[in-house]
Image (tube, rainbow, N blue to C red):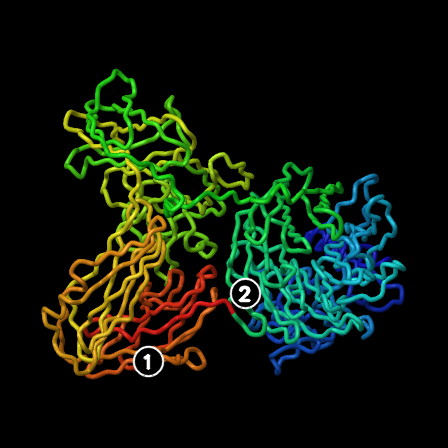
Amino acid sequence: MIRISNLLSEQFIARCFGRAFRLLTVSLFLFAGLFSTPANGGEWKIDYHADIAPILRDYCSGCHNETDYEGDFSVETYAALMKGGETEDETMIVPGSAERSFLMRALNKQTKPAMPPKKEPQPQSEELALIEKWVNQGGRGPRPEEDHSLLATLTVPHIEPKKNVAKSIAAAEFSPDGKILAEAGFGGVDLVEVGTGKVLKHLPNQDGAGKVNAIHFSGDGKQLIMATGISGIKGFALVWSVATASVIREIGGDAHRDILFDAEFSPDGKWIATAGYDRVIRLWERNTGKLVRDIPGHNGAVFDLAFSPDSRLLASASGDETGKIWRVDTGKRLDTLNQPSGEQFAITFTPDGKEILAAGADNRIRMWRVVSRDKPRINPLIQARFAHEDEIVSLEITADGKWLASSSADRTVKLWKLPMLTQARVFPDQSDLVSSLAFSPVGGRCFFAGRMDGSTEMFSFDERDFSNPDATGSSDEPDPVGWKIPSGQLKKVAEKEAGGVAQRVSAPVEISGSIARPDEKDFFRFAARKGEQWILEVNAAQSKSPLDSKVEVLTSDGGLIERVAFQSVRDSWFTFRGRDSDQVDSFRLQNWREMELNEYLYANGEVIKLWSYPRGPDSGFRVYPGFGKRYGFFGTTPLAHFLGEPCYIVRPLKPGTKIVPNGLPVYHLYYENDDDPRRLLGSDSKLVFVAPQDGEYLAAISDVRGFGGKNFSYHLMIRPPHPGFTIEVGGMKTKISPGGGKELEFKAKRVDGFDGEIAINISNLPPGYSADTPVVIEAGQERAYVTLRSDAHVKAVTPEQAGAIRVAAVATVRGKKVVQTVKGGIGEIQLGKAAKLLVNLEPDGDSGHIAPDGVLEFHLNPAGTVKARVKALRNGFKGDVKFGTDDSGRNLPHGVFVDNIGLNGLMIPANQNEQQLFITAAKWVPEMTRMFHLRTTADGEQVTQAVRLVIENQ
């Protein structure tokens, strides 16, 4: 009798026809064993590899293998099965006695733990009977030399390939001299002569492997490595001689348990790195093929690897939605780039090694600055772009680091300008997914694209076409140094009813009128020259009129005039509660880690500007101005927003700019306004108009609700801007303890677009008092803080002494120095009781030092962090010493903040006397020197001494 188990391959049945068909085979085998006599007349012997291993593979090997070693037990080989696991008093297999074998009792649920667990697929009675019979027959296994892993074999039916089918291009790369293009696909790699397209050599895959997932030339172009393998069985890399088309070495076949997705030569020629579906990165000696180390740490397949140009670092992109950076010499993880929200398929260093770019299933390209070179550090995210409408599969960068190409499942290829990661061109409507990209190292600007349908194409571009791909517009209301400021006296005129014909006026002018009927709109025609700036300002609600005004500027024939276009570069939405039209804080947004301060956020017609980062687990962005009521930008009116409402980070573009589509919306704003964006006029309107050309324009005023009536009066001014500022001192009564300190706040009210810095100086302080001035209100900001300190033996300040104190504010407006004296100085100074608490800032280790002038000084790099300590001297105060949450760190430069403050903010607990703090700077903070301090809410709001912070690029 011919044994059925030899007639039908067990693996073929299990893989191709399913478990049900195999159960039929097992049943037939058992039936045949009962009623048939073997040729040798003895009992029929069950074969371990053909009959038992497939059952163990289906039900046991998922948890009990050499990698997932649950219960210290593996069934991967016969020797491991016989060795048993953590239960020392139980023998896994007792040859000849199934009832004494722990394996059978576990499978029959007669002991604990029962196997497999209840939630897992269970073996059928026929399969259990087969194992029992095998054990009773002695549980014989294979010879030691044939005891291979039950996970290392795969039997599949032979399927004849279709003829005349184009070979899919899975990977491609140019040789360093640009003369050869390697194209990889199923079955191997073709070396193609550039220029002729002639296939010079074919490098076939080996050991039954099919698809080649990645290829790379060595630095000298003499060798080529291909990453391949057999899914579920093994992964390996082949190192080829390009000259002889022969295999020099196979890497990784015994180590990787699944197919490889990448294999890379290190730039210094010493190492080979491999990784794939089994989640483990492995480092090998290139010249010997010796395994140097395993680098575990990813929880998903590793799809791409990249060495830094100096070979010190290795970056990896994984299906666990992270990129990681590793030290090559130790295998130590230096950082996890965990901002992505989808699998990461591609990762690369810039040619100078200063940045890393990665992309994947969340449709974004991100760029991080590399700072973790020797020890673990957080590498700051410096760019993030919504790049494609589907997952991104490939990134390729030019040798000079100026250009990046990306391809996506949306069947587009895009070209990006670095370092700003600005989209320059789209190559749409590809015939299939472009799975591989390769820039030519010689010649002009061109790159190769290989598609899954086997087609290929060379794309070229002239970078002179993209000399200014940003075409970014100016800020909302720039400092009017370069403005054309109209002149003339403000004339007053009254509105005249003209039967729908626009009333002609000569600006500058103040027009008195009313919206007498519902849905009425009054028009006034005025002339302006190209580049002139005019302010259109309404006084209605301020004078108790019921009019809720809207003001517009139109073309002479009533057409809209575009003020700015916004291209969305990142999508988002509100993730926690909505915001009303006044709030500046807790803007909780999806993908907030991709956002940067001073970026514009577009939400349902309103344009907001990000002012400070989320500072704790229950916080969000603050938006400009950071305090009080929030501003609208580009003439937009602050609105209420609901939970889940979509919003976008946008970049402003000049009207008429040719916009390269990126899959996100483009918004166009026109010259119109409902409420004053700076909130100084309440619900009255204010609009800044820049004439695009010489000609006549229409100023239009109406009620935004469509209301009207005889008492809906207004005054509409069309006037030149008068940029300037005023300064207020926050709190005009200061109580200070002897030897203590208090904080003084200076607030700027900016007018008509003045956005420059303002320096404030305090003079004529009484004896024993000091203030660290001048203090600067930074350009674009509204507040600055300074410490007023007293000696331990000061006397009360007399009214005469207080009145002699002078506060002067100095700024440059339209190229001229302007000095303002703040009326009332800093107000009244009262001498309080002795302080129960004093607080001071001190260095922390080697961070911070005393400068020659005796001032504590810290040095900080943009995108860096320094440490400090704050200490409390308790003179009777026993409670918590709190320094605030997102307002910790007073008078720090914009973009510098106290980091890692936690839920309770920066605080010295009641039973402690000191606390460490971290000061972090955003990547864009300019070099400067600034005094800052901390303020506690305890004991009358005591402050630390002012310390010096030096921002510098080192």
> In the image, residue 906 lies at what x, y percent?
33, 71
Look at discs 1 and 2 and give the one toward the viewer: 1
Q: Residues within 10 Å of mark 1 (few under 14, many from 20)?
A: some
Q: CA distance from mark 1 to mark 2?
A: 31 Å
Image: 899 above or below 621: below
Looking at the image, residue 40 lies above or below residue 188? below
Amino acid type at mark 1: Glu
Q: Is residue 586 visible?
A: no
Asked where in the image residue 453 lies, by quadrant, the reply is: top right
In the rendering, at what x and y percent does residue 11 appear?
Answer: 75, 57
- Which residue is more in the foreground, 567 or 73? 567
Earlier-in-chain disc, 1 versus 2: 2
The answer, for residue 935, to whether it is visible in the render is: yes
Number of numbered labels in the structure image: 2
Secondary structure at numbered mark 1: strand
Q: Residues within 10 Å of mark 2 (few under 14, many from 20)?
A: some
Q: Is residue 946 left or right of residue 219?
A: left
Residue located farthest toward the top when viewing the structure as drawn:
499
Question: Which type of secondary structure does the marked residue at label 2 adopt?
Answer: strand
**Residue at left 14%, top 70%?**
829
Residue named by callout 2: 336
Closer to the camera in the image, 470 or 327:
470
Residue 357 percent coordinates (x, y): 59, 57
User: The disc labelled 2 sits on which kind of residue?
Assistant: Thr
Which of the image's four quarters has the N terminus?
A: bottom right
- What residue would you read off at disc 1? 914
| Front one among 733 and 851 | 851
